[in-house]
Amino acid sequence: MMKNTFLTGVATAALLGICALAPARAQTPEPAAALPAPATASAIQTIPGMPPVINPNNIYSEARPDNIAPEVAKDPARIYVPNLRSNDVYVIDPATMTVVDRFPVGRSPQHVVPSWDLRTLWATNNAEGTTQGSLTPINPRTGKPGQAIPVDDPYNMYFTPDGKSAIVVAEARKRLDFRDPHTMAMQGSVEAPECRGINHAAFSIDGRYAIFTCEFGGMVAKVDTVNRRLLGYLKLSTGGMPQDILAAPNGKTFYVADMHADGVFVLDGDTFKETGFIHTGVGTHGIYPSRDDTVMYVANRGSHKVHGPRHSKDGSVSVVDFATNKVIRTWPVPGGGSPDMGNVSADGKLLWLSGRFDDVVYAIDTTTGAMKEIPVGAEPHGLTVWPQPGRYSVGHTGIMR
C-alpha cells in the first residue's frame, strides 16, 4: 500500500505522523492530457511574478526550436559536461562532436544548471562528504568559468518559476536552501527530514508547488514554493529508488524515474497520489521532454547500483508517448553503456546524455536512435545543452518554459 502524508498545520514537525492510505499502484497509467490548441494565458493563475502560461495544455509550448531568445541565440552552441570524479567540466562543440575545452571547478561537480534568466550556467559542486561545496558560474557567451561561490552541499539547483529564488538542493542535509538567484545569499530553508537523498524536482503549472524525489527513502516530497514549507510525503508503492522527475505538458501529471523499479511512476500532483507505472528498462534514471512536446526520453542506466559496471548490456533509452503513457521505442546502447542525465538539442534532433559509468557522452539521433560516443572526464553526470529555446529555466539541466 502507498502512504500519502500531508502536512497541513503550521507546526509541521508535530504533524509528520498524520497519514492516510491510498490505493495500491494502478496497473494502467492515466495518460497526460493531449495537446489541443492554446487557450488564453489568463486561464492559469500563476504565482506573482511568474511569466504567464501561454498554453494551459502545454507548459513547454514556449521551449520549441523557434523560441530562442535573441541574447541566448548569440551564445555559441556547446555541451557542458560536469565530471564527478575528475572535478572538471568538459566542453563539446556539437558541430564537430569534439571536446574543445576543459576547466577545473569545485569538488564533485554534479550538474550544470542554466539560471532562470538564461545568462549564467552554474556548476553545482557538492563536495561529497565534506563542507566545501561551491557553485561555479560559467559565462555562456564565452564558455569560461568565473569565481566559485561557497555554498553548502549543492547537489542540484532549481529556480522558482517567478525567478525570485534559486533552490539549492542540499542532499546530504535533507534540506532545500532558498537563495538569491544571482548572489546566492541565503533567503531561507525548508527542512525535509524524512526525504533521504533529496535531489530532483519538478514544478506545477502555476508554480505554487514542487515535488522533490527522495532517492534513498523510496518517496517524494511536496513543497509549497510560495510559503516555503513542506506539504507532505508520498511513499511510492514499491519503495524503490526515485531519481529524476518531470512534469507532463499539462503541468499536473508528474513522472518519477525509479532506478530500482525499472520504470516511471505516474503521479497526480494536485491530489498527490500515485496513478500508474510505466516499465522502461534497467536502472531508470533521467527524463527529458522532446522539443515538440509529444514524447519523453527516459534514460535507463543499466544498473541498480549507485556505482554500476561499465558497458552494461542493459543500458538503453526508452521513448514514451505523453498522450498514451506507452513506450513506443527503445534504443539500446551499442556495446552496452550507462545513459544518465542530459538534455535535448535546441532543434530537437539530438538527445545528449552522459554515460555515467563509461566516461563518455552519447549524442543520440531522436529520429533513428543512432548513437555517437565522445570520451570525456571521469564519471560525467548532469550535462547541459546550450543554447536552449524558452523564456526561462526552472533549473536542473535546463527544464525550460
Image (spheres, helix red, strand yellow):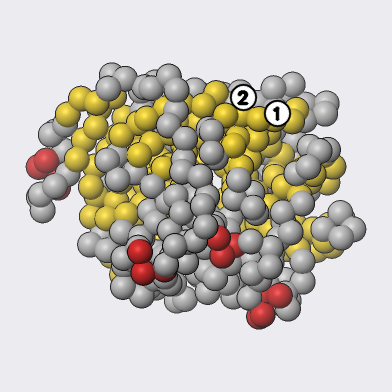
- Residue 164 x, y percent position in the rendering: 38, 73
Question: Which residue was labeled with disc 1?
Answer: 330
**Dot 1: few (<14), some (14–19), or many (≥20) neighbours within 10 Å?**
some
Q: Which secondary structure, mark 1?
A: strand
Image disc number at residue 264 = none
Viewer-proximal residue among 162 and 108? 162
Q: Amino acid at mark 2?
A: Gly
Q: Specify few, some or many for label 2: CA neighbours under 10 Å numbering under 14, 14-19, or 20 or more.
A: many
- Residue behind mark 2: 281
Give me the residue at 60% from left, 35% from top: 320
- Placement of 80 over or under 338, stated as above or below: below
Residue found at x 64% / y 61%:
64
Circles 2 and 1 in contact, beta carbons < 8 Å: yes
User: Where does the image place residue 265, in percent across and percent down from the top left?
Assistant: 45, 31
Residue 120 in the image: state x and y as whole percent: 59, 72
Mark 2 and mark 1: span between their CA atoms? 9 Å
Which residue is at a point 31% across and 30% down the rendered structure image?
235
Q: Amino acid at mark 1?
A: Thr
